[in-house]
Every structure is written in structure tokens, then in C-alpha cells.
Amino acid sequence: MLRLQNFQGQEIEPYLDALGALRITVFRDFPYLYDGNLDYERDYLKVYMECPRSMAVLAFHGDAVVGASTCMPMEDEGPEFQEPFRRNDHDLSKICYLGESILLSQYRGRGVGKKFFIEREKHAQSLGMRMTTFCAVNRPLDHSLRPANYQSLDSFWQSRGYVKQPDMQATFHWKDVNEEHESAKTLTFWTKTLA
């Protein structure tokens, strides 16, 4: 049986390596195709540990971390996340950025993804936020590494009340599993206005 537990700020520190390893495993699959390493992950994830208003929802099977979901105020995120919202005159102090929502494949289909969104939205509301947002990588339908049975998460995100914002995009760089070097990837934001 899976157990979910929320951690804030410094409470995340003991789980940084487990969270990094999970990101490397899950994001290696399509559509991210991320060829990651733990040193980079530790550095990237420190921002959550150093932000007192951040939260990580971890899914445990016994003592093993098998899923994770993160969020933090947009004000505390990097400029590449903030810029599309600044351009559209959004108040960053009212936006919560939802980071990864990842789960090992054998634990999917049990409602954990929904719980990840519910917990992060509750956290955002407790901070007085009025909007939650995340971004997802754009990949062509005919991508050579797209599995034949791949199912997009678009309909799941729509069922959670999120709306794709095609005019709000960001560019990030990472190395795909089939690349020699990092390349630019475009990600599109999805947003939800909280009640």
C-alpha cells in the first residue's frame, strides 16, 4: 500500500537523492527523454529545500520513495519560469508553480496523480495563491522515440481543471537519451484558477 506524506522546505533535504533518482528514472521515458545525472539533480532540487514555502508530496512503498510531486511560489522560481507570466501581466505573488509529478510506472493507475494535484492545490490555497501552473514539454506526434502505446496526459490535466496556454512557453536545455549534447526544448504552460 502506498503512503503519501507532505514535506516543506528543509524537511525535503533527507529525500533529495531519492527524489533526484526518481526524476532521472521517470523523465528518461518519452516525452522528456531526459539523460540526467544525480549531481545536477541535487543542485536543481536544492531550490525546493531552500524555499520555506515549497512543498514536496512523496509517495512511499514501505521506506522507498516511488513517487513525488513538488510546488513552490512562482516568486521563488527562476526567471525562465516567471517570464511568460510577467509578459501577460500576472501577479507572481498569487501563482504557485507545480514542479514534477512523477510516479514509477508500476504504481500508476491508483489515483496517486490526482492526490498529488489535490495536495499541491491545497498548499497553494493555504499560501493565498489564486492560480496554479505547470509546464510540459512539446514533442511532435511523429517523434522517432514516441512509443506506439504512448498516451498523452492532456485529458487528465484537463479533467483536473487545467487549461493549456499555447502563448505561454519557456525554453529549457537538457540532453535527450539519443543526443550527444544538450539542446533547447520548448515547454508550454497549463494554468488553473483556484476557487
Image (cartoon, grey):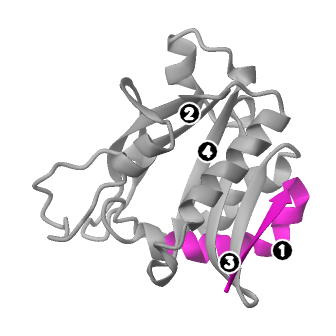
Labelled disc at residue 14: 1
CA neighbours of label 2 inside 10 A, class few (<14), some (14 to 19), many (20+): many
Q: Which residue was labeled with disc 2?
A: 81
Q: Amino acid at mark 3?
A: Ala
Give SS at disc 2.
helix
> Which comes sooner in the sequence, label 2 or label 3?
3
- Near-viewer residue (122 or 98): 122
Q: Amino acid at mark 2?
A: Phe
> Which comes sooner in the sequence, label 4 or label 1?
1
Asked if residue 16 lies in the magenta stretch, the reply is yes
Between the residue at mark 4 and the residue at mark 1, the CA separation in whole angstroms equals 21 Å
Labelled disc at residue 98: 4
> Is 140 left, or right, of 118 in this rendering?
left
Give SS at disc 1.
helix
Asked if residue 41 lies in the magenta stretch, the reply is no
> Which comes sooner in the sequence, label 4 or label 3?
3
Residue range (magenta): 1-24
> Which comes sooner in the sequence, label 1 or label 2?
1
> Which comes sooner in the sequence, label 4 or label 2?
2
Q: Amino acid at mark 1?
A: Pro
- Look at the image and tell me whether residue 44 can be seen: no
Q: Which residue is drawn at the image coordinates 68% and 21% (left, top)?
A: 92
